């Protein structure tokens, strides 16, 4: 059980020996375990370093440039006095303001007034061609007719929920699933039903059993909503064999799948790449893939896309919303098409992966360097999130309270549908490596009683 206790500013009650291990952080490589050290050696002690970071008064979030990060303009502002690991979006310092300013100017220079009028319903052809080219492989062809431009994955899911489902229909989801994705489904009158998952993603046998049980009870299952790649909230990456097993279940029973792939461009571990998407493996038959630029460029662009069967995509393109207003986010679509065409997007994403890798490692290394016991976690291979589980039968409320008393804001697992274990989601995308190291130190000691 976790003994909930306040972690003081001077950390005079940090228990447990340091041990004789190595701790490598992205901002500094230091060793632990030497005795009789000089003052210089002590300065290199990672625990000392982590204490300094955790004690830092610069803990109110990356909000120092008020002119650029203004309450009342942005959706969420971190509370003062805490290190906020709840938001699932990028540190403002990672948003490419100058790159986008230049790209908007380039797009307006190239397209002129055509960039400022109503756009093609399905989305501008230059962007759809670029996205189709990136999705296509020899084994799984994809053309612009498979692509519909959206205002992000949220709008894509909203459109698909209305197209594939009707109020009262069931949607099968992973047992831990994106909370606002489930909210979009319920707003549409659909009924999310959790399906057990393991470290490889949704369990195919459990998916089949849940589908048959719902149908036996007389309920229509509209589709399965799955996040197989760097999953939100758990960070899980579904391997290729599991993807094929899931697709076999879906094909056997005529179950459509909506694949949320917001993080597919963000593998962070060397040698790890995401397998082909569910949609590509199914040749876009009864599987629709949702993608977004919110995680790779900026959420304020409100720009994403879906890939699906051309007949389905064409039908959505005649939705009244698109017929009335034209393609979604027309000028930003042209701007991003310019970035994709000249390679600037790929260079930016390569840089961003390095930044996120540093942040992930700072948090994970600090957690791993703490006292043993109290919690467990797996270092994710990509995306934004680290999933931490409490051990010893601790209640989620106690975990969240311990984190709060330590000055760290977290997202409780129940927010994502998890009830059988105490778990929290930690986002490493929103803070600097130093702040994440400090947060990891605080959590490791607060959750180890």
Image: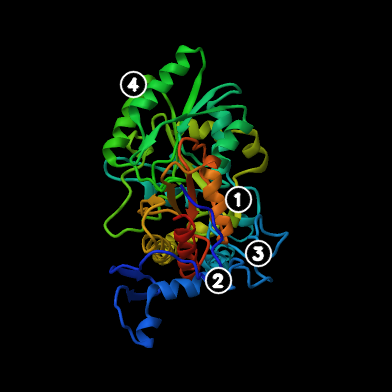
Task: Compare marks 2 and 1 and give the one earlier in the sequence.
Answer: 2
Q: Are marks 4 and 2 in contact (CB under 8 Å)?
A: no
Task: Compare marks 4 and 2 and give the one earlier in the sequence.
Answer: 2
Task: Find disc 4 in the rendering and name its residue.
Answer: 252
What is the x, y in percent for residue 49?
A: 43, 75
Mark linked to residue 98: 2
The nearer-to-camera label among 1 and 4 is 4
Crowdedness near tag 2: few (<14), some (14–19) or many (≥20) residues, C-alpha within 10 Å? few
Task: Compare marks 1 and 4 and give the one earlier in the sequence.
Answer: 4
Task: Compare marks 3 and 1 and give the one earlier in the sequence.
Answer: 3
**Nearest the eye: 192 or 149:** 192
What is the x, y in percent for residue 48?
A: 43, 75
The nearer-to-camera label among 4 and 2 is 4
Whole-angstrom CA distance, mark 1 to mark 4, is 38 Å
Number of labels in the image equals 4
Whole-angstrom CA distance, mark 4 to mark 3, is 52 Å
């Amino acid at each position: 059980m976790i003994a909930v206790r306040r972690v003081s500013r001077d950390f005079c009650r940090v228990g447990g020996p340091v041990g004789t291990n190595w701790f490598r952080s992205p901002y500094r490589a230091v060793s632990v375990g030497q005795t009789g050290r000089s003052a210089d050696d002590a300065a290199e002690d990672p625990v000392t370093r982590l204490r300094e970071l955790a004690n830092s008064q610069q803990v109110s979030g990356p909000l120092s440039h008020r002119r650029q990060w203004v309450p009342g303009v942005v959706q969420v502002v971190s509370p003062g006095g805490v290190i906020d690991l709840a938001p699932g979006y990028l540190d403002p310092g990672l948003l490419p303001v100058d790159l986008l300013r230049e790209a908007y100017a380039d797009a307006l220079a190239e397209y002129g007034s055509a960039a400022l009028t109503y756009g093609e319903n399905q989305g501008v052809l230059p962007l759809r061609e670029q996205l189709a080219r990136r999705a296509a492989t020899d084994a799984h062809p994809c053309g612009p007719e498979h692509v519909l431009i959206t205002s992000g994955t949220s709008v894509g899911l909203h459109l698909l929920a209305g197209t594939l489902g009707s109020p009262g229909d069931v949607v099968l989801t992973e047992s831990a699933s994106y909370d606002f994705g489930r909210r979009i489904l319920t707003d549409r009158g659909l009924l999310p039903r959790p399906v057990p998952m393991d470290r490889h993603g949704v369990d195919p046998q459990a998916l089949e059993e849940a589908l048959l049980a719902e149908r036996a009870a007389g309920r229509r299952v509209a589709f399965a909503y799955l996040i197989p790649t760097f999953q939100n909230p758990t960070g899980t990456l579904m391997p290729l064999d599991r993807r094929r097993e899931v697709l076999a279940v879906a094909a056997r029973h005529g179950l459509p799948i909506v694949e949320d792939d917001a993080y597919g461009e963000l593998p962070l571990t060397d040698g790890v790449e995401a397998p082909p998407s569910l949609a590509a493996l199914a040749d876009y038959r009864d599987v629709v893939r949702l993608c977004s630029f919110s995680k790779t460029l900026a959420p304020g662009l409100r720009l994403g896309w879906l890939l699906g069967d051309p007949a389905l995509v064409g039908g959505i393109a005649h939705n009244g919303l698109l017929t009335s207003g034209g393609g979604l986010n027309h000028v930003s679509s042209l701007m991003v098409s310019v970035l994709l065409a000249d390679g600037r997007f790929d260079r930016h994403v390569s840089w961003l992966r390095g930044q996120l890798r540093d942040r992930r490692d700072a948090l994970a290394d600090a957690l791993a360097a703490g006292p043993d016991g109290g919690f467990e976690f797996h270092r994710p291979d990509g995306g934004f999130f680290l999933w931490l589980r409490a051990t010893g039968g601790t209640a989620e409320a106690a975990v969240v309270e311990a984190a709060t008393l330590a000055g760290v804001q977290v997202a409780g697992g129940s927010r994502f549908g998890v009830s059988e274990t105490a778990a929290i989601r930690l986002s490493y995308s929103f803070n600097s490596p130093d702040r994440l190291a400090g947060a990891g130190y605080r959590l490791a000691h607060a959750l180890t009683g």
